[in-house]
Image (tube, grey):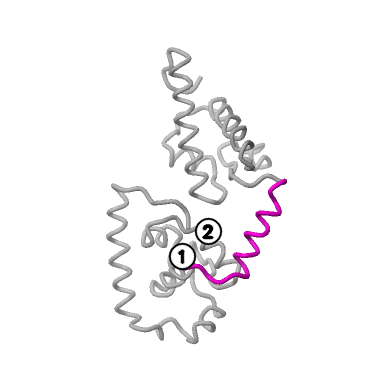
Amino acid sequence: MYGVPCYNVSNLVKFMEENLKKIAAVLFLSNQAVSLTELKKITELTELDQNSLENIFTELNNRLLTVGLILIRDTNRNNKNYEQQEIIIAVQKEMSEIAKKIRQNELEGDLTPAALQVITICAYLNGASSNEISFIRGVQSSQSIRTLSARGLIKNNNSKYFLTIECLQSLGISKIEELEEFEKTRQDFQERLNETKQESIQEPVAANA
């Protein structure tokens, strides 16, 4: 049933629970829609069949519903290609007002230290991918990236994030090379990036910020 030998109910339940935790962790840390293909690759569950996955998704959604969350799946793409469907953890409709307040604060409140770190990395590297930003900071950074993008302070170009003209303007510069000790700091960031990529092979990246 689950693509692996399971000889009794106890083993079956344990197997399902372990994989449910893996899937929930990836969706939580990603903080954005993840394709099923990518999800199976990250969790190393490529051998699971459709029935097994559906059972896990159903159980995960049932648990999320008890804490104000819900599992959303791209059903339109699901009808065309099961593996390419996208999945995300979101808040339930009843919690939408709370979510709205949080989003509003992201757009209007002061930038957090995490967001300022992302701006600094994007500036001194003259463009950085989401993974590179997270490698350097040591935590997942999709939330800060989303906030900065919504504010128009960074933009995505070929999977790398760059400062916008508006951001440069707010920093009082016309080009990133005018930043203090630009070349030295850029080299430091690049070295740190190379180091953290090596370290990440042994250590997981922390939760989102």
Identify the residue at horizontal 50%, vertical 33% (top origin).
20
**Residue 15 horizontal side relative to residue 149, left or right:** left
Amino acid bearing label 2: Gln
Q: Residues within 10 Å of mark 1 (few under 14, many from 20)?
A: some
Q: Position of residue 67 (x, y in %)?
A: 61, 40
Residue 50 higher or lower than 167, as above or below: above
Prevailing secondary structure of the magenta residues = helix
Identify the residue at horizontal 29%, vertical 73% (top origin).
187
Residue 5 higher or lower than 85, as above or below: above
Q: Regarding mark 2 in the picture, which secondary structure is present there?
A: helix
Q: Position of residue 182 (x, y in %)?
A: 35, 80
The residue lying toward the viewer, choosing from 48 and 25, is 25
Q: Which residues are magenta?
A: 94-113
Q: Position of residue 172 (x, y in %)?
A: 50, 87
Mark 2, residue position: 143
Find residue 169 and report its image quarter: bottom right
The answer to whether residue 107 is visible is yes
**Residue 144 horizontal side relative to residue 192, left or right:** right
Q: Which is nearer the N-term, disc 2 or disc 1?
A: 1
Residue 91 higher or lower than 176, as above or below: above
Identify the residue at horizontal 53%, vertical 70% (top origin).
111
Q: Is residue 96 magenta?
A: yes
Q: Is residue 71 magenta?
A: no
Identify the residue at horizontal 37%, vertical 57% (top origin).
138
Q: Regarding mark 1 in the picture, which secondary structure is present there?
A: helix
Q: Position of residue 73 (x, y in %)?
A: 63, 41
Amino acid bearing label 1: Ala
Mark 1, residue position: 114
